[in-house]
Image (tube, helix red, strand yellow):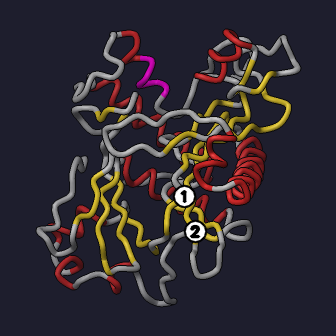
Amino acid sequence: MALTQTNLDGILPLIARGKVRDIYEVDPQTLLFVATDRISAYDVVMGNPVPDKGRLLTKLSEFWFQFLEGDVRNHLFPIAEGKTMWDYLPAALSSDDKYRSQLEGRSLLVKRFRLIPLEVIVRGYITGSAWKEYTQHGTVHGVVQENKDLKESQQLPTPVFTPSTKAEQGEHDENITVQQAEELVGKELCDRVAKLAVGLYTKCRDYALSRGIIIADTKFEFGIDDATGEIILVDEVLTPDSSRFWSGKEYAPGRSQDSYDKQFLRDWLTANKLAGVPDVSMPEDIVTKTRAKYIEAYETLTGDKYTS
């Protein structure tokens, strides 16, 4: 059964309900991230969920956190050997199937860090808003491109850091220049974040290519460990919600690409003039096809069979 919204009856305080995740406070230093089956597009949440989506996002994020363990610290809570997440949560949650069924397989216990207020977007291929900007102005994120003959979906010479603001729930993220990002968080930190993000993207892009998937672009989020000054990888990582995934086999520059992500839903909304309309009910075939695309992305990238 799909999960649209969690309800823990106050056993843990709910501190945020985002477009997809419900976030609970376990203690002042620890949070519980629960990925529901809600799906959003054009900054609004759809009226019906996509079954298994939350579990797929959680499993894929766990995969990438582990893949990048030697490159960047992440916010996952260090669970001791022989223990599970349930050992760190109130017994009232683990002992009652009403709560276990909401949390099992879709929850991450994470450490709390101060967030860097940027959406850290890295683009490896020219598509979406970047392609639109290039066709109108010859620029990508305000930077003039030496190549005047780029094709839609073509790989960029090097991955590009294109930050945006991190908007509050219900607001829209706004693209900003690198200079504006530097003013927001400081030049030194912005440079560190950009270098780290491009490096992480490049490593994951190369791995994904070996599995037959092109990561066209992705969005990272980072925090800061104030005790050490280290940058921490937080939130979700390289999921179909935060990235554009294309089929390597079907890839052909000069057109839009078939994708394993929310682009399928966005295209349907646009075709039906529903982009940005809140609480839209998706037809069953759109739900089924979206779920299938998320499963295919997970299985192709990890090599594991998904079982719900």
Residue 247 lies, in percent from the top left, at 65, 30
To which residue does mark 2 refer? 224
Task: State the mark number for residue 116.
Answer: 1
Q: Is residue 16 above or below residue 217?
A: below
Quick check: 278 left or right of 257?
left
Residue 36 lies, in percent from the top left, at 31, 51
Q: Look at the image and give the residue range highlighted in magenta.
A: 263-267
Comparing 182 with 194, the one in front is 182
Residue at 53% of width from left, 46% of height from top? 239
Circles 1, 2 touching at the beta carbon (< 8 Å):
yes
Quick check: 157 left or right of 281?
right
For badge 1, the amino acid type reads Ile
Let me know if residue 117 appears in the view: yes
- Circle 2: element type: strand
Residue at 85% of width from left, 31% of height from top? 157
Residue at 75% of width from left, 14% of height from top? 138
CA–CA distance in space, label 1 to label 2: 7 Å
